[in-house]
Image (cartoon, helix red, strand yellow):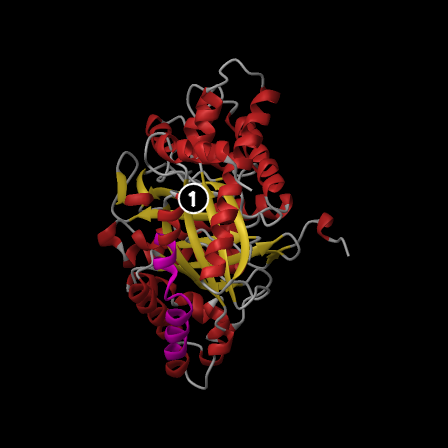
């Protein structure tokens, strides 16, 4: 139960420290929508999403007003669409556009689930589905897409990795008038999770209930403020402070999640305690790391600081709720974090350092802009590196990379809002095309054989 002191602390976190509920995401199963034709299925998909989520924006506004905690995004995730489209390969775009129309009708921010799971193999209908991604993302506004290309249990499907390098290039070209914005709605995963409420990688897993509410809570500013209050503390005390702060944030998220689920006639799924930054100053994971003692994020010591932060956040969260899930930890999206943006502009933060950081934090290489002439094979190689980190370490990793058409190092892309701006970062010029074009499967590590 919340007492008087809890309420005052929460008010201060909201007013001074940028605490918010980053997203309420309703997961909806579309498996009952499969009909004899793509047209009938698309119609049922639209009707189902509109019916199930018709009150999500209204309920979010009510909860925000009642509890005084901003709820920034209202989202929906659905069953991976490649599964829904299996009976009629080549017509998945109909489903994608129906979902985008539903998102527009509901007034939500994003809808995730135009997704495929090909971590061990890729059926013909799944390859056809993936080939549709560039055109679908270019012709929709709110629809997000993801593809899972590897797992710790199955290894890495390098045929899918190669294809996704090409798909990302085509998506950037299809949205070149918007600096390749389509790529900001496309994620390539290893070890994708079924209950992730964050875009662009959210989808409703086949192991989930029919309708579920997952909430993502974000509080980089709260954590930074807590660290500022103990400037002379040693690292043990710092970790304890972060844990206690994460505990408070998670309790606020669970309160909202349970009440939202009740009002929306859905099951309460999980609270994802991820420190998801915004471009606003004071709401930055990079600035937390600098408050811990780094002159600039990206310098030596950054990975160690991030590892400690991520671990402390998880420990505090699991003490506050038995339903912590999703990705829970610290995100490091370059374009969405003012500290990351500035470090990249200075040249202190580079792609190789970001890759090292992804071994100890949530997800992976996120919202990174690279030169528009970066080859598909190079993008595939970046995906393969990141997937290998996830596979070997049994964690979720991902790549959301934007090859900005017609732009090079020293320029930037600007998407506005929460997606922010990103300086274009250099990539290595030496080719990995022979490696990528070998294809096949990188076998799962020996420690995956646990049965």
Q: In this view, does 230 lie above or below 360?
A: above
Considering depth in this image, is 313 or 124 the residue closer to the camera? 313
Q: Would residue 119 appear left or right of 289 to someone viewing this image?
A: right
Q: Would residue 288 appear left or right of 360 to someone viewing this image?
A: left
Is residue 260 something one can see in this rendering? yes
Is residue 147 something one can see in this rendering? no
Q: Which region is colored magenta?
A: 42-61
Q: Where is residue 155 in the image (x, y as percent from the top left)?
A: 63, 55
Magenta-drawn stretch contains 51 = yes
Q: Residue at x 29, y 64 (%)?
A: 104
Considering depth in this image, is 419 or 117 the residue closer to the camera? 419
Q: Residue at x 40, y 69 (%)?
A: 49
Q: Where is residue 200 in the image (x, y as percent from the top left)?
A: 41, 53
Q: Position of residue 179 (x, y in %)?
A: 26, 49
Sort mark 1 into few (<14), some (14-19) or many (20+) by Cα contacts within 10 Å: many
Q: Which residue is drawn at 57% across and 64% down?
A: 208
Q: In this view, does 174 lie above or below 249?
A: below
Considering depth in this image, is 53 or 259 the residue closer to the camera? 259
Magenta-drawn stretch contains 319 = no
Identity of the residue furthest to the bottom in this view: 36
Identity of the residue furthest to the right in this view: 451
Considering depth in this image, is 322 or 415 the residue closer to the camera? 322
Identity of the residue furthest to the front in this view: 4
Q: Which residue position holds label 1?
A: 366
Quadrant where the image shows the N terminus: top right
Quadrant where the image shows the C terminus: bottom right
Determine the main secondary structure of the stretch shown in magenta. Answer: helix
Q: Where is residue 361 in the image (x, y as percent from the top left)?
A: 53, 38
Helix, strand or loop at label 1? It is strand
Q: In this view, does 52 lie above or below 263?
A: below
């Amino acid at each position: 139960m919340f007492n008087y002191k809890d309420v005052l602390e929460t008010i201060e976190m909201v007013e001074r420290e940028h605490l918010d509920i980053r997203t309420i995401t309703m997961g909806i199963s579309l498996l009952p929508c499969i009909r004899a034709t793509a047209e009938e299925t698309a119609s049922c998909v639209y009707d189902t999403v509109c019916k199930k989520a018709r009150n999500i924006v209204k309920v979010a506004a009510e909860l925000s007003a009642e509890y005084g905690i901003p709820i920034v995004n209202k989202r929906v995730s659905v069953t991976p669409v490649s599964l829904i489209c299996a009976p009629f390969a080549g017509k998945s775009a109909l489903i994608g556009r129906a979902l985008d129309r539903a998102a527009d009708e509901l007034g939500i921010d994003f809808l995730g689930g135009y997704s495929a799971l090909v971590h061990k193999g890729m059926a013909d209908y799944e390859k056809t589905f993936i080939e549709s991604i560039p055109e679908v993302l270019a012709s929709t506004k709110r629809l997000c897409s993801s593809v899972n290309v590897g797992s710790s249990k199955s290894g890495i499907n390098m045929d899918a990795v190669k294809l996704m390098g090409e798909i990302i290039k085509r998506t950037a070209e299809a949205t070149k008038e918007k600096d390749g914005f389509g790529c900001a709605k496309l994620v390539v995963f290893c070890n994708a999770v079924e209950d992730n409420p964050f875009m662009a990688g959210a989808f409703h897993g086949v192991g989930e209930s029919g309708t579920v509410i997952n909430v993502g809570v974000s509080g980089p500013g709260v954590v930074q403020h807590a660290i500022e209050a103990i400037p002379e503390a040693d690292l043990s005390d710092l970790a304890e402070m972060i844990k206690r702060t994460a505990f408070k944030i998670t309790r606020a998220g669970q309160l909202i999640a349970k009440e939202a689920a009740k009002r929306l006639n859905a099951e309460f799924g999980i609270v994802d305690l991820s420190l998801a930054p915004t471009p606003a100053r004071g709401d930055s994971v990079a600035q937390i790391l600098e408050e811990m003692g780094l002159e600039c994020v990206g310098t030596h010591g950054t990975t160690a600081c991030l590892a400690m932060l991520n671990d402390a956040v998880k420990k505090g969260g699991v003490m506050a709720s038995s339903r912590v899930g999703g990705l829970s930890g610290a995100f490091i999206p370059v374009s969405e974090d003012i500290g990351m943006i500035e470090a990249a502009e200075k040249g202190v933060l580079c792609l190789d350092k970001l890759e090292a950081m992804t071994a100890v934090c949530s997800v992976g290489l996120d919202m990174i802009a690279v030169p528009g002439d970066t080859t598909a094979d190079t993008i595939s190689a970046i995906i393969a590196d990141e997937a290998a980190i996830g596979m070997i370490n049994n964690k979720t990793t991902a790549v959301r990379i934007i090859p900005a058409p017609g732009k090079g190092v020293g320029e930037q892309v600007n998407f506005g809002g929460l997606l922010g701006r990103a300086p274009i970062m250099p990539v290595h010029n030496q080719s990995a095309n022979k490696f990528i074009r070998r294809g096949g499967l990188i076998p799962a590590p020996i420690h995956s054989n646990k049965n």
